[in-house]
C-alpha cells in the first residue's frame, strides 16, 4: 500500500477502506509516514470529509494505536464525561462527586490548561498535596473504593491522536468534523467507560461557533460511540459567555464547592444536573430524568456529594480540610473591582477575552511548560442580560499586584458589550442528542 495513493484517493473524493485507514494510523504511530504526507491527507479529509463508516474506522484505529484501559474489574456501570472546552468550565469538579454519591462510578482522565482555557488537573492542584499521577492499579482501585478518580492522561493512551493533533494545530486542519470526532472519541473509547456523556459547547467562546455545527459534531460522536458499543449521549450547551461566574483555578474550585454546598444556583448547577441525569439514566441508576435530578439534588442537600469530593481529594493526597475551609485554598493578595464605564444591559461577554484576562493575570499557560498562578483570576458580577450602571463593578479581579489588576480590568471592560437593549434570553441547554436507535 502506498501513502501517495491514499492521499490521491481522498483528494479526488474517494472513500478510504478500513485497511487504508489502519495503514495510515499505523504509519503515523510508528513514524514511518513523514509529516508532509500526513498533513496532505489531513487536508484532503478537511476538504472531502469522511462518511460515518470511515470516521468509525479512523476512530477505532486511533483507539487501538496505544494502550486501552480495562475497567472490567470495577463493580457496576462505569461512566466518563468529556467537554469540548470553554472558559470557566469547572463542571467535572462538581459533577463527578454528585454522580459518584449516587453509586455510579466515574473513571476520568483529564488534561492541563493551555492558553485561555483551564485544565481540570491544574484546578485540582489548588488543594495542597493533590496529585493526578496515579498508577493504573491506583486509578482502578480508587474508582472502586471512592467512586471516582481523576488522573492525568498517560503517554501510552492514543499516541496517534497526540501526533495528529500536534500536526493539525499547525497545518490549519483542526476544523473538520471527522477529525474532531475521531480525536475525541478515540480517547474516550480507549479510556474504557460503558457510558460516555459529552458536553458540546456552542457560541463565541466555543470550538463550534454555531449551533448547527455543534449539532452535527454531537450527532456524529453519539453515533460513533453507539457503533463502538458504548452508551453515548451529548448535550449541546451555551458558551457564548463564560460558564458560571469564576474564571481562574482556585476561584473555579471555590465555585464548584459552593455548588456542592448548595450555595450556588445558576447555569453551572443546571449543567451538572443535566449531564448527571444523562449519566444516571444511562447507567440504569434512575428510571427517568425527573428521578435522576431528584437524586442528584438530594445528594447536594444532605452533604453526601460534598463528602464524596472530600474523600476523593484525600485519596489523591490532597488536604480534605480545604473542601470545608476555603481559607486553606490559594488566595491572591490583591482584590480589585473592575468598574464599568458604560451603563446599560450586558449584551455580550466575549468568553475568549475573559479567558485571556485570566491568562494575563498569570492563571493560564502560554506554553505547555510554563507555570501558572493558581490564586489569580476573576469573579464576574454581571452576566448577559444584567443591567449595569456606570461605575458599578463588572467583576472582582484577583491579582498578584495592583499593576496587573489595573491592566486586567481594562482588558475585561473590552470583553463586555453594553447597550441600551436587553438581549433576549437564550436557553442554556440547547439540545440533548441520543443514539438514533
Ligand atoms: N478536542 C480534541 O481532543 N480533539 C479535537 O480534535 C478537538 C477538540
Image (tube, rainbow, N blue to C red):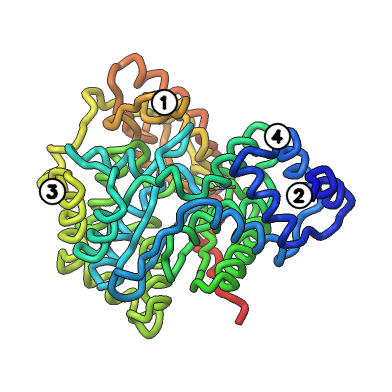
10 Å crowding of disc 3: few (<14), some (14-19), many (20+):
many
Q: CA distance from mark 3 to mark 4?
A: 49 Å
Q: Residue at x 57, y 46 (%)?
A: 161
Q: Are marks 3 and 4 in contact (CB under 8 Å)?
A: no
Location of the C terminus (image quadrant): bottom right
Secondary structure beneath disc 2? helix
Label at residue 320 = 3
What residue does disc 1 label? 369
Q: Residue furthest top?
A: 403
Sequence-wise, the earlier of marks 3 and 1 is: 3
Q: CA distance from mark 3 to mark 1?
A: 28 Å
The spot of residue 107 in percent (x, y) is 34, 60
Number of the label disc, if any, that sits on residue 45: 2
Of labels 2 and 4, earlier in sequence is 4
Which mark sits nearer the N-terminus, 3 or 4?
4
Position of 410 with respect to 45 (left or right) is left
Between label 1 and label 4, give the one nearer the viewer: 4
Q: Which mark is residue 391?
A: none
Pointer 2 and pointer 3: residues touching (CB < 8 Å)?
no
Q: Which residue is drawn at the image coordinates 70% and 34% (left, top)?
A: 34
Q: Can residue 197 be seen by looking at this rendering?
A: yes
Q: Nearer the viewer, mark 3 or mark 1?
A: 1
Earlier sequence position, callout 2 versus callout 3: 2
- The residue at the point 27 percent across, 70 percent down is 297
Element on which disc 3 rests: loop
In three-dimensional space, the C-alpha distance between marks 1 and 4, rounded to whole angstroms, equals 26 Å
The residue that disc 4 covers is 34
Mark 1 vs mark 2: which is more N-terminal? 2
Amino acid at each position: 500500500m502506498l501513502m501517495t495513493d491514499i492521499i490521491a484517493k481522498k483528494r479526488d473524493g474517494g472513500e478510504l477502506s478500513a485497511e487504508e485507514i489502519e495503514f495510515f494510523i499505523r504509519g503515523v504511530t510508528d513514524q514511518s509516514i513523514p509529516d508532509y504526507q500526513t498533513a496532505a491527507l489531513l487536508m484532503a479529509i478537511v476538504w472531502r470529509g469522511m462518511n460515518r463508516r470511515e470516521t468509525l474506522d479512523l476512530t477505532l484505529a486511533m483507539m487501538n494505536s496505544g494502550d486501552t484501559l480495562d475497567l472490567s474489574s470495577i463493580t457496576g456501570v462505569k461512566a466518563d464525561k468529556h467537554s469540548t472546552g470553554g472558559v470557566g468550565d469547572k463542571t467535572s469538579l462538581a459533577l463527578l462527586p454528585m454522580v459518584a454519591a449516587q453509586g455510579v462510578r466515574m473513571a476520568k482522565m483529564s488534561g492541563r490548561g493551555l492558553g485561555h482555557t483551564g485544565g481540570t488537573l491544574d484546578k485540582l492542584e489548588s488543594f495542597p498535596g493533590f496529585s493526578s499521577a496515579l498508577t493504573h492499579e491506583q486509578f482502578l482501585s480508587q474508582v472502586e473504593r471512592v467512586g471516582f478518580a481523576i488522573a492525568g492522561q498517560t503517554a501510552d493512551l492514543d499516541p496517534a491522536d497526540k501526533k495528529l493533533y500536534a500536526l493539525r494545530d499547525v497545518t490549519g486542519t483542526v476544523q473538520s468534523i471527522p477529525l474532531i470526532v475521531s480525536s475525541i472519541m478515540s480517547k474516550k473509547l480507549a479510556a474504557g467507560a460503558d457510558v460516555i456523556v459529552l458536553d458540546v459547547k456552542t457560541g463565541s467562546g466555543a470550538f463550534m461557533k454555531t449551533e448547527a455545527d455543534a449539532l452535527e459534531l454531537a450527532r456524529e460522536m453519539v453515533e460513533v460511540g453507539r457503533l463502538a458499543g458504548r452508551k453515548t449521549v451529548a448535550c449541546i450547551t451555551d458558551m457564548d459567555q463564560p460558564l458560571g461566574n469564576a474564571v481562574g483555578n482556585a476561584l473555579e474550585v471555590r465555585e464548584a464547592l459552593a455548588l456542592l454546598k448548595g450555595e450556588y444556583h445558576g447555569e453551572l448547577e443546571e449543567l451538572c444536573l443535566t449531564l448527571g441525569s444523562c449519566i444516571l439514566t444511562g447507567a440504569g441508576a434512575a428510571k427517568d430524568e425527573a428521578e435522576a435530578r431528584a437524586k442528584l439534588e438530594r445528594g447536594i442537600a444532605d452533604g453526601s456529594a460534598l463528602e464524596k469530593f472530600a474523600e476523593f481529594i484525600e485519596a489523591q493526597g490532597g488536604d480534605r480540610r480545604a473542601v470545608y475551609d476555603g481559607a486553606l485554598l490559594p488566595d491572591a493578595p490583591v482584590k480589585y473591582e473592575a468598574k464599568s464605564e458604560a451603563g446599560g444591559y450586558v449584551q455580550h461577554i466575549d468568553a475568549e477575552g475573559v479567558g485571556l484576562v485570566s491568562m494575563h493575570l498569570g492563571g493560564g499557560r502560554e506554553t505547555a511548560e510554563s507555570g501558572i498562578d493558581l490564586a489569580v483570576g476573576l469573579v464576574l458580577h454581571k452576566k448577559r442580560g444584567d443591567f449595569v450602571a456606570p461605575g458599578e463593578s463588572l467583576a472582582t479581579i484577583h491579582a498578584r499586584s495592583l499593576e496587573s489588576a489595573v491592566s486586567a480590568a481594562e482588558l475585561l471592560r473590552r470583553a463586555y458589550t453594553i447597550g441600551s437593549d436587553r438581549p433576549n434570553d437564550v436557553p442554556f441547554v440547547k439540545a440533548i442528542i441520543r443514539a438514533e436507535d
